[in-house]
Image (cartoon, grey):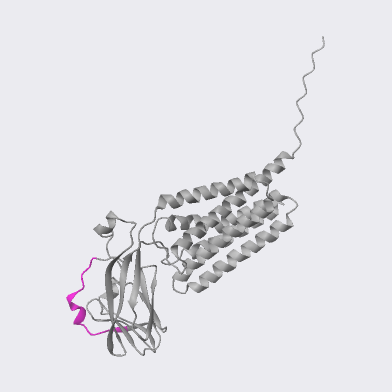
Amino acid sequence: MSRLLSVVVALGVALAVPMAAGAHSGETGGTDYQTTMTTVPAGIDVRVIGGDDRLEVRRTTAREVVILGYGKEPYLRLDAQGTWENRNSPAVALNDERYTSDPVPETATKLGPDWVQTSTGDSVIFHDHRSHWMGSQPPVDVRGEPGTTRTLYDWAVPMVIDESPVELQGTVVWVGTPASWLWWLLSAVLVIGALLVGLLTRLPVAALAVAGTVAAVLASVVTGSSQELDVPGGGTGALIALAIGGGALAAALLVGHRLRAVPAHATTVLLMVALVFGALQLVGLASTAFTYGLVPGPLPTLLTRLFVLLGLAGVGLVAGACARAWRDVLAELPAAAPPKAPKAPTW
């Protein structure tokens, strides 16, 4: 039995490492700003990565797309051969970092383009300092009411599509910071409450442990997949997270079923899976989701927070069920025989 549990633990840790790393790859951290688009020129698709971090421009029906830099010089080009970068554009260096105070050189519009091909694809991803807030602190009026959503400013990125000048336009929005303490308090109440339900009620420990494990792994897979889908090429990472989480859950349920004759052992296996494939991801995500106003990804931030609460409560539930199962095992152990009184000495 101990060998089986050791194998489950080792397998869980080995699989959880890439899952956790994949779920946190790319620009998936929280932010209090959101870049939105109001006008997208015909012939291209555009999406925002990381909430406000980068723009991804994809050529669809346009023959040629030229994105202009900060001095209105050619900066990036997309055509039938792939994507190109003008090495003479100051935007190449300025966009290496999200935040920069370097001015645009006066030579920006005086040098001819030096095009270097960067890929054979039809999309390009880049920082653009016009489309996100550049300050290390929010605006002064925002600091007075940080919980209020408001539009900060409108932005535009000039382009030339099929030799016609156009603009990609949008707004930068302060989404507002959440009441972090309230979400942490709510999560603590739910975890403790679920722990007490698993420990003190008379409901079957197996059913409670299964429900808690399913909730923990499901919440982890859904939120992790949403984070993966925010980054370029994240579809593969989302499928991997789904496969690992689903496989771990199926294996846990199978092993738990085989060990059902000893509920303490079955619930221990389920608890390990809930911790490794649930809590490991969710605790880290909670620090982001409860602190920032926006968690990038297709899943709305409010739903992300609710899934975090559901998953953490599930971990508490299976932990309480496991503790009750072991308590019952200890209660059934035979009582130790009382020590014998020493014999009186004989003279």
Q: Residue 68: give x, y in percent of width and height.
A: 27, 80
Q: Nearer the viewer, residue 97 or 218?
A: 218
* Residue 97 visible somewhere in the drawing: no
* Residue 79 visible somewhere in the drawing: yes
Residue most toward the top? 347
Q: Residue 75: give x, y in percent of width and height.
A: 29, 80
Q: Is residue 327 toward the left or the right of residue 25 in the image?
A: right
Q: Nearer the viewer, residue 223 or 111?
A: 223
Residue 113 drawn in magenta: yes
Magenta segment:
101-115
Q: Is residue 200 toward the left or the right of residue 128 in the image?
A: right
Q: Is residue 158 toward the left or the right of residue 243 in the image?
A: left
Q: How many marks?
A: 0
Query: Which residue is rendered at x = 43% and y = 57% of the image?
Result: 288
Query: Which residue is rendered at x = 31% and y = 71% of the image?
Result: 171
Q: Is residue 85 above or below residue 246?
A: below
Query: Which residue is rendered at x = 72% and y = 52% of the image?
Result: 1
Q: Residue 247: give x, y in percent of width and height.
A: 62, 65
Residue most toward the left? 106
The quadrant in which residue 272 appears is bottom right
The quadrant in which residue 12 appears is bottom right
The quadrant in which residue 336 appears is top right
Residue 282 drawn in magenta: no
**Prevailing SS of the magenta stretch:** loop
Give the quarter of the figure containing the C terminus: top right
